[in-house]
Amino acid sequence: NMNRFDFESIIYIDSMLGIDSSGAEIKGEYLAEEIFFLGFKHIYITTGHSPDLIQTNKYIKGVLGKDPPGSCAN
């Protein structure tokens, strides 16, 4: 159903998405590549950890904390 969304939409993906059936961590950083090739270009990773710990790539525009953009949460 991705074709229902505007390709200019901003996509936020959590860095840690869960654990797969083999026990491996599912990373949002890898999902970003798939979403990029669907046509979305404004992809951000969110994390509760230091952004410096997140490996970025050409598919990721930036790394943000868990607070929503523009929020006053500290």
Image (cartoon, rainbow, N blue to C red):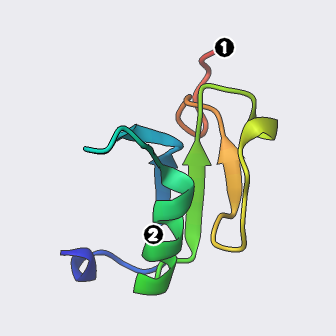
- Marks 2/1 in contact by CB < 8 Å: the verdict is no
Residue kind at label 2, given as amino acid type:
Ser
Q: Residue furthest front?
A: 22
Judge whether 32 appears above or below 22 on screen.
below
Residue 52 locus on image (x, y percent):
81, 38
- The answer to which quarter of the image holds residue 21 is top left
Instruction: Say which residue label 1 marks.
Output: 74
Q: Nearer the viewer, residue 5 or 44?
A: 44
Spatial separation of the CA atoms under disc 2 and disc 1: 26 Å
Q: Residue at x 26, y 75 (%)?
A: 2
Name the N-terminal-most of marks 2 and 1. 2
Judge whether 68 appears above or below 61 on screen.
above
Residue 16 locus on image (x, y percent):
48, 38
Q: Residue at x 60, y 26 (%)?
A: 48
Residue 74 locus on image (x, y percent):
66, 14
**How many other residues sit within 10 Å of disc 2, few (<14), some (14-19) or many (≥20)?**
few
Q: Residue at x 61, y 37 (%)?
A: 70
The N terminus - image quarter = bottom left
Q: Residue at x 56, y 28 (%)?
A: 67
Residue kind at label 1, given as amino acid type:
Asn
- The answer to which quarter of the image holds residue 41 is bottom right
Instruction: Say which residue label 2 marks.
Output: 9
Q: Is residue 21 left or right of residue 40?
A: left
